[in-house]
Amino acid sequence: MADLTIRNITTVLTMDDGRSELTDCDIRITDGMIAAVGPDLDPMGEVVEAKGCLVTPGLVNTHHHLYQTLTRAVPGGQDALLFGWLKTLYPIWARFGPEEMRISALTGLAELALSGCTLTSDHLYLFPNGARLDDTIDAAREIGMRFHPTRGSMSIGESAGGLPPDSVVEREEDILNDCIRVIDAHHDASEGSMIRVGVAPCSPFSVSRELMRDAALLARDKGVMLHTHLAENDEDIAYSEEMFGCRPGQYAEDLGWTGDDVWHAHCVKLDGAEIDLFARSRTGVAHCPCSNCRLGSGIAPVRAMRDAGVRVGLGVDGSASNDAGNLVAEARQAMLLQRVARGADKMSAREALWIATRGGAEVLGRDDCGQIAVRKRADIAVWDVSGVESAGSWDPAALLLAGPTRVKHLFVEGRQVVRDGYLTTIDLPRVIETQNRLATALAR
Ligand SMILES: [Zn+2]
């Protein structure tokens, strides 16, 4: 028995292997999976009408720090470069606890869902005052988002020559033990999994060489993925050359941080040899165009990466450095930024949307998500292209050129998380009220 049929869809961008685009068709969903796609299917189960709508796979976000939604537009960090920005925010983040982690995650996840996202990773790398990765996992379960949380960490504080204050760093032994705890408690490797945990030391400038190496060994032992920040801006490259005597790509390769089970955020400054290394080793990249613009880091060489065969997904990055978390807007920014760097014919609206869906799913190791095809998971975004944003468009499927920035409906594992533009699973006004109360308290 079907759970649901989405009927009379005007256009479907499937993002399947043939990049098929279908018109006037239906999608039938059974047990969280796409059971049939085609014209005039018998309507079974609940029926959702989608006339005048564009349907895409749910968007995939490959880099975020959900907790940062509580520190958006902090005055001292608004115009700073990466390292200065971090130094402004670390002492504020040090005052977070479990409630701040859960509510900020709910806020960030809600914003993502409304912008078409069905699968997101998260990179949480500080655990003050009893906060745990579990706080964010609770939030993802509550909202119904497919979730890849990564257990981040920082171990080199200011007194040891690192960037973060000593109060937010942890002992390396404790970090590794907690990685094992959260993997054993929450990681689900099965097809259709709603939670997959990764291991993610924050960056080469906030943990030791030993922790980077041990984290890679642990992740491979447990069969989970590895994630960190890499080659984000010029300061980052200079730090690598001065402290490690090599570029970030070399550092990553030496410590086991390349492979199809690894993805790195930003990679704005990868050079040609590093792009070849990533392509050869199937290492993934989370491209974060708005954050890169916001922090003035530069334009990531996404065109060169894609041409070389590097797997690239999209990330909104933490909401303190974006400061928004709208994934479809992020995809538009990715398209525009490559055009600024390379020319108007270097990134089409469809390619940028492919990166935001199928590309992200590949980076996160999910061949069961990111496309609309039979036997793939039913993660589906329904965009109303009959409204003012698309009015007059000759090609409503060119969503990133002219289209809505919020979904009409969103399905995750076949469950409707957004209906007619509203979240069905949480009381969003109440979450916003709590979020603003917590932000006000932190500002005092
Ligand atoms: Zn980041």
Image (cartoon, rainbow, N blue to C red):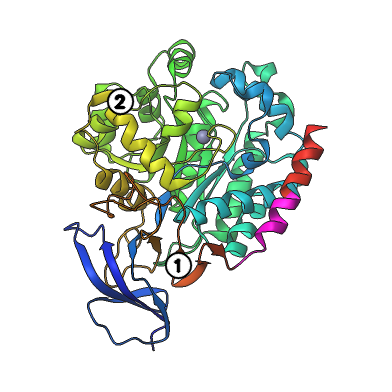
Q: Residue at x 37, y 68 (%)?
A: 377
- Check disc 2 and report its element: helix, strand or loop: helix
SS class of the residue under badge 1? strand
Residue 238 at x, y percent in the picture = 45, 12
- Which residue does the image show at 54% across and 21% down from the upper left? 82
Q: Is residue 98 visible?
A: no
Q: Of the residues under marks 2 and 1, which one precedes in the sequence?
A: 2
Relative image position of residue 390 (x, y in whole percent): 35, 52
Q: Is residue 329 visible?
A: yes
* Residue at the (66%, 47%) spot, across then down: 104
Which of the image's four quarters has the N terminus?
A: bottom left
How many residues crowd mark 1 within 10 Å: few (<14), some (14–19), many (20+)? many
Q: Looking at the picture, tell me which residue is in the foreground, 352 or 256.
A: 352
Was residue 345 drawn as part of the magenta stretch in this picture?
no
Question: Any magenta on residue 432?
Answer: yes
From the image, tell me which residue sits under label 1: 411
Q: Amino acid at mark 1?
A: Phe
143 to the left or right of 346: right
Instruction: Tell me the residue that label 2 is attached to.
Output: 340
Q: Residue furthest top?
A: 242
Picture quadrant of residue 24: bottom left
240 relative to 370 in the view: left or right: right
Q: Residue at x 29, y 87 (%)?
A: 42
Residue type pointed to by label 2: Val
Residue 64: give x, y in percent of width and height: 52, 42
Q: Write the start and end of the magenta stretch as one range.
A: 425-434
Q: Nearer the viewer, residue 275 or 432?
A: 432
Please tell me whether the stretch drawn in magenta is mainly helix, strand or loop. helix
Is residue 265 placed above or below 140 in the rendered structure? above
Residue nearer the viewer, 208 or 204: 204
Whether label 1 lies within 8 Å of ligand 1 gets the answer no
